[in-house]
């Protein structure tokens, strides 16, 4: 039986529709997709140069304490002024908290002297130990003198020229420098006074808190020794007495 003419027409239309090509994707007038490109060799080179310049500037900035004093007087005054404004040198002084904590070597007033001896032993820095009385000892080495009482560090003195001049103390140098104990630290750096004193001068600093000893309460005290305004040594000792007065230098 032949198909209904209307049904045949619908089948024919459906067949034609399936064979028609898909309409093109509509685009806005003038639109053309750009080809994808990677970075050119010149762009990569420019980025590398920029990174090197930034890294170099960072190195110069964080090491300016080393190189700036050597070139300061060789630069034109206007250039030196600009550099000082952009990257001023950090203020120099003594890090008293680092001194309190033992300067990276467990050299702490009222601390156990064996802790310090253990650190210097790791450095292979020979320290001479001599008994000076009942429960009292003296430790000595080039640039170092420590007095011990009842197992505790009672007083000490560090001579910077000898410490920095002896290779056995080389492991200690970074900690001393970090604390500000260097041979170019000046009276002005510590006190802010530009009038550099002549001859031998002392700058005392008493710290807190106090430590309870059998003889009473004792505070750690440090004395910076200067020669013609330049630091030569630091002396650590104690000060007895109970007081809440704030040290004038603190």
Image (cartoon, rainbow, N blue to C red):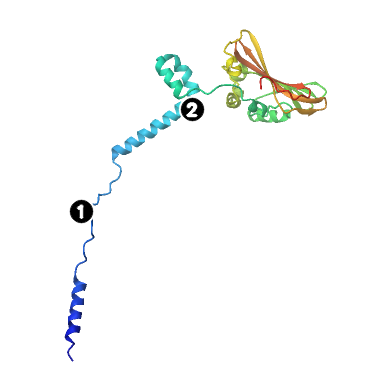
Secondary structure under tag 2 reads: helix
Q: Nearer the viewer, residue 163 or 208?
A: 208
Q: Where in the figure is residue 51, as x and y percent of width and height?
A: 39, 34
Secondary structure under tag 1 reads: loop
Q: Is residue 116 above or below residue 9?
A: above
Q: Which residue is mark 2?
A: 62
Going 21% across and 64% down the picture, which residue do you hit?
Answer: 23
Q: Which residue is mark 1?
A: 29
**Quadrant the C terminus occupies:** top right
Going 18% across and 83% down the picture, which residue do you hit?
Answer: 8
Q: Where in the figure is residue 198, as x and y percent of width and height?
A: 61, 7
Image label count: 2
Going 57% across and 13% down the picture, which residue do you hit?
Answer: 194
Q: Nearer the viewer, residue 34 or 59?
A: 34
Q: Is residue 9 above or below residue 220?
A: below
Q: Where in the figure is residue 171, as x and y percent of width and height?
A: 59, 27
């Amino acid at each position: 039986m032949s198909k209904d003419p209307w049904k045949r027409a619908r089948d024919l239309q459906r067949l034609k529709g399936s064979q028609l090509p898909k309409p093109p994707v509509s685009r806005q007038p003038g639109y053309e997709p750009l080809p994808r490109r990677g970075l050119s060799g010149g762009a990569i080179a420019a980025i590398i140069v920029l990174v090197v310049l930034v890294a170099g500037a960072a190195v110069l900035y964080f090491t300016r304490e080393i190189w700036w004093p050597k070139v300061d007087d060789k630069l034109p005054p206007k250039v030196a002024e600009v550099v000082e404004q952009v990257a001023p040198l950090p203020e120099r002084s003594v890090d008293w908290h680092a001194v309190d904590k033992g300067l990276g070597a467990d050299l702490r007033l009222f601390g156990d002297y064996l802790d310090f001896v253990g650190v210097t032993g790791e450095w292979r820095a020979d320290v001479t130990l001599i008994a000076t009385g009942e429960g009292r000892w003296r430790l000595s080495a080039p640039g170092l003198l420590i007095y011990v009482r009842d197992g505790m560090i009672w007083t000490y003195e560090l001579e910077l020229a000898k410490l920095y001049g002896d290779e056995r103390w080389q492991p200690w140098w970074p900690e001393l420098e970090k604390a500000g104990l260097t041979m170019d630290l000046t009276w002005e750096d510590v006190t802010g006074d530009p009038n550099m004193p002549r001859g031998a001068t002392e700058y005392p600093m008493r710290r807190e808190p106090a430590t309870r000893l059998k003889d009473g309460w004792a505070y750690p005290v440090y004395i910076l020794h200067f020669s013609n305004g330049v630091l030569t040594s630091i002396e650590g000792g104690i000060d007895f007495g109970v007081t809440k007065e704030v040290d004038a230098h603190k």
